[in-house]
Image (tube, grey):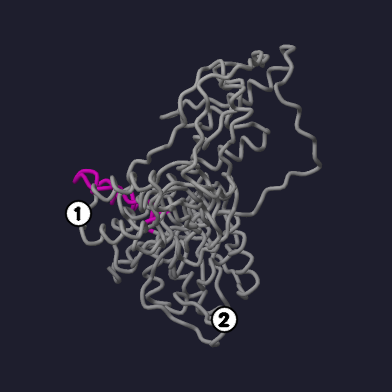
């Protein structure tokens, strides 16, 4: 007799308490094997695939795509021990026996994984899923059979092995539906709304569709394997907007007008909002700033890249040079490489500098962390910045790459602004903000000249140091920007 087991949303690590369902990878009635990914979720840190520790038949799913679930809430139920699940599990056990015979035998006996699901799951390779399909029926009888045959629902069912077969012929006939005049290249022309998971990966695509009251199940994706891209949703929006001009009625009623738009604070946006609010509540911050002549720094960078380019080496970015300057400044002023333990009423000075840098992505603002930045040179820091930035843009940053920073560098100059007052990335003690580098009038060598000028802003936790220490840190950074040769003492 089959035993129905409940699989709950596991602890994904790093203090995360909830996750949003992005895409279901299995449907009710599918046969899954141990450690097969069953759902893709988005946390405040990253997007992850969650594997199931049970092998059997999926009997129910909890939560629609886009729903937010807390850790420990039920994800799905699996019937373990049924004839259908035994066949799928036997195939999985046979393929895994050659690698880990002892572990595979234990997992096969219990129908579960012996691993702990934290972070990115158990790490076992995902097997292909098998789907239980009903007996084929004729196209003439499919419509009336759908009205009488019991449908698989998202609610739990008592017996997973009972999948009713639809009779081969149905005497009743149903007149064909009236077609809806829409563009065939954009919207699907099925008379019945399709079911199953939507082929969408990007949360931005889902948000855009919600804002325009579009049903993603009616949009034909042009991406790989039918993946719905942002361009597909935008094409559908243009097609619907053009219908009234051509005298054609819309296939859906116009959305009701509201006085304001409400956007849920969840995912990365919610995590950023909570961290910034907590920083303002708990940290008595202060900001000081200074203008610096960055002409010599830009000349030094050009010389480095010219020498590195001839030798085939990578180019050094301005951000990498500023990051190297920050690590040198933290070595001189370790008070700012610290955190505050409010409960113990202690300042905790940290031995290593793990440098975070702000990166703007389509999913929102993230702060990847360069581990042990104090042990790296400018070229190594630049390579790590490039690697983490690419991972941020593609949504592949792990929670471990987004936590553990001790000091943050924020280059808001890329947005074309000169200055700002940064908010400290809690629980750190300081953040350095860098504005754009632009030509400005400057007194150089006793004469007025046009120089490359940048504004530097330091926001610091006034509990860890006073203005003298913060000012000394910022002045040292400015001096290194104006005279990069000062860094030779620490290299």
Is label 1 or label 2 in front? 1
The residue tagged with tag 1: helix, strand or loop?
A: loop
Label 1, label 2: how many angstroms apart (C-alpha)?
Answer: 55 Å
Residue 101 included in the magenta stretch of the image: no
Q: Could you tell me residue 202's position as x and y percent? A: 51, 40
Question: Is disc 2 surrounded by few (<14), some (14 to 19) or many (20+) residues within 10 Å?
Answer: some
**Residue drawn at the location 62% of the way across and 22% of the way down:** 144
**Total marks drawn?**
2
- Asked if residue 152 is positioned above or below residue 115 in the image, the reply reads above
Residue 414 % position (x, y): 50, 48
Q: Residue at x 39, y 43 (%)?
A: 84
Q: Earlier in the sequence, mark 1 or mark 2?
A: 1
Q: Position of residue 21 (x, y in %)?
A: 54, 49
> Residue 168 or 475: which is nearer the viewer?
168
Labels 1 & 2 near each other (Cβ < 8 A) = no
Please provide the residue range marked out in magenta.
295-321
**Label disc, if present, on residue 463 of the rendered structure:** 2
Residue that badge 1 annotates: 99
Q: Is residue 117 visible?
A: yes
- For image coordinates 61% across by 72% down, the residue present is 286
Report crowding for label 1: few under 14, some 14 to 19, many 20 or more residues within 10 A (C-alpha).
few
Q: Please, what secondary structure does the residue beneath circle 2 have?
A: loop
Q: Is 356 left or right of 207, judged from the image as shown? A: left
């Amino acid at each position: 007799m089959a035993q129905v087991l409940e699989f709950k949303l596991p602890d994904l690590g790093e203090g995360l308490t909830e996750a949003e369902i992005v895409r279901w990878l299995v449907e009710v009635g599918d046969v899954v094997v141990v450690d097969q990914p069953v759902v893709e979720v988005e946390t405040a840190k990253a997007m992850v695939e969650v594997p199931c520790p049970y092998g059997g038949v999926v009997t129910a799913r909890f939560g629609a795509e886009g729903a937010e679930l807390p850790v420990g809430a039920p994800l799905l139920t699996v019937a373990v021990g049924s004839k259908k699940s035994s066949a799928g599990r036997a195939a999985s056990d046979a393929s895994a026996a050659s690698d880990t015979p002892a572990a595979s035998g234990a997992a096969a006996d219990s129908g579960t994984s012996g691993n702990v699901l934290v972070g990115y799951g158990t790490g076992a390779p995902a097997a292909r899923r098998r789907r239980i399909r009903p007996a084929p029926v004729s196209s003439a009888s499919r419509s009336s059979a759908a009205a009488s045959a019991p449908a698989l629902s998202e609610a739990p069912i008592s017996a997973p092995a009972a999948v009713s077969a639809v009779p081969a012929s149905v005497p009743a006939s149903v007149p064909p539906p009236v077609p809806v005049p829409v563009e065939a290249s954009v919207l699907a022309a099925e008379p019945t709304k399709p079911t199953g998971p939507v082929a969408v990966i990007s949360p931005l695509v889902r948000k855009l569709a919600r804002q325009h009251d579009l049903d993603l199940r009616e949009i034909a994706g042009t991406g790989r394997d039918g993946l719905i891209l942002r361009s597909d949703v935008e094409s559908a929006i243009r097609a619907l907007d053009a219908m009234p001009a051509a005298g054609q009625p819309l296939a859906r009623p116009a959305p009701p007008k509201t006085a304001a738009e409400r956007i849920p604070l969840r995912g990365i946006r919610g995590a950023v909002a909570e961290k910034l609010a907590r920083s303002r509540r708990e940290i008595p911050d202060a900001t000081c700033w200074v203008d610096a002549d960055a002409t010599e720094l830009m000349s030094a960078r050009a010389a480095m890249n010219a020498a590195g380019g001839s030798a085939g080496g990578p180019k050094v970015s301005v951000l990498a040079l500023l990051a190297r300057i920050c690590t040198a400044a933290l070595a001189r002023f370790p008070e700012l490489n610290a955190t505050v333990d409010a409960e113990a009423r202690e300042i905790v000075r940290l031995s290593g500098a793990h440098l975070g840098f702000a990166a703007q992505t389509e999913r929102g603002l993230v702060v990847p962390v360069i581990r042990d930045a104090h042990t790296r040179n400018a070229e190594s820091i630049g390579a790590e910045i490039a690697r983490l930035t690419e991972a941020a843009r593609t949504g592949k940053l792990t929670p471990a790459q987004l936590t553990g920073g001790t000091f943050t560098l924020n280059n808001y100059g890329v947005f074309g602004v000169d200055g700002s007052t940064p908010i400290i990335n809690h629980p750190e003690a300081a953040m350095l903000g860098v504005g754009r580098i632009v030509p400005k009038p400057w007194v150089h060598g006793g004469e007025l000249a046009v120089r490359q000028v940048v504004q530097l802003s330091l926001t610091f936790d006034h509990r860890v140091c006073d203005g003298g220490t913060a000012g000394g840190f910022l002045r040292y950074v400015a001096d290194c920007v104006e005279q990069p040769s000062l860094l030779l003492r620490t290299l």
